[in-house]
Amino acid sequence: GLSELGSERTQAWFKAAETKHGRVAMAAFLGFIAQCTPQVSGEHTFAPYRGYVAGCSPQEQWDNIPTIGKLQIFILIGMLESYGEGAASDGSYTHYMKGGVPGFYPSIKGKNNGQISLELYDPFGFGFRDKPADKRARGLKSEILNGRAAMFGIMGFLAEGKVPGSVPILSKIAGFPHYDGEVMAPFAPALHLNF
């Protein structure tokens, strides 16, 4: 609770949450930019998913993905998150709230009865985890700072897409994708919950 706000465990949780949110924001920021390119949003010989419509904004592309496809994405994220949180059970990994490193994702190679053949981080074994501790610390700091910038960036993209002129620097970009839907309701077009 709030009584433990300054404890090491709570601080580790905040650091891990910031790192995870930063990673998601960096992926979202780059994904938004990629989805604005004609190579992604344009015509395709083979449709990337059922319901694909060329020339849509990134938000409209998400709306067009069938609900089952969206659920698959969220289930995969949930599986990875639960693995990262529960990997300490075999003793090979120290959880960040028990003295481990916030942002460190445990090895996944060989798990699930050996069915997983690649690591999630450094899948081709370039040795990124073998760097000296000072370089890893510098890399984590850079990742956190880039993640913070990406959080502002993706929210700026979404704000400008919803309210033209809300981000002056983006409103000067000709053809910036605008969106009339509800950005904060990812299942809105296909799923309605009436409470």
Image (spheres, grey):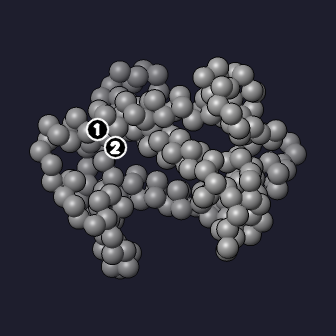
Secondary structure of the residue carrying numbered label 1: helix
Question: Which residue occupies 33% across, 79% down?
Answer: 114
State left or right for residue 85 relative to residue 191. left
Depth order, front residue of 63/195: 63
Tag 2: Cα neighbours inside 10 Å, few (<14), some, or many (≥20)? many
Q: Quadrant of the C terminus?
A: top right
* Spot occupied by residue 164 in the image (x, y as percentages of width and height): 75, 27
* Spot occupied by residue 165 in the image (x, y as percentages of width and height): 72, 22
How far apart are labels 1 and 2 at the CA level?
Answer: 8 Å
Residue at the left extreme, as displayed: 132
State left or right for residue 122 relative to residue 80. left
Depth order, front residue of 2/103: 103
Tag 1: Cα neighbours inside 10 Å, few (<14), some, or many (≥20)? some
Residue at the right extreme, as displayed: 194
Residue 13 to residue 126: above or below: above
Question: Which residue occupies 39% across, 54% down?
Answer: 84
Provide the residue designation for mark 2. 103
Secondary structure of the residue carrying numbered label 2: loop
State left or right for residue 62 relative to residue 151. right
Q: Quadrant of residue 16?
A: top left
**Which disc number belongs to residue 140?**
1
* Spot occupied by residue 15 in the image (x, y as percentages of width and height): 37, 33
Depth order, front residue of 33/90: 33
Mark 1 or 2, nearer chain start: 2
Q: Is residue 83 visible?
A: yes
* Spot occupied by residue 175 in the image (x, y as percentages of width and height): 71, 38
Q: Amino acid at mark 1?
A: Leu
Question: Which residue occupies 40% across, 38% down?
Answer: 19
Q: Amino acid at mark 2?
A: Gly
- Cβ–Cβ under 8 Å for marks 1 and 2: yes
Q: Nearer the viewer, mark 1 or mark 2?
A: 1
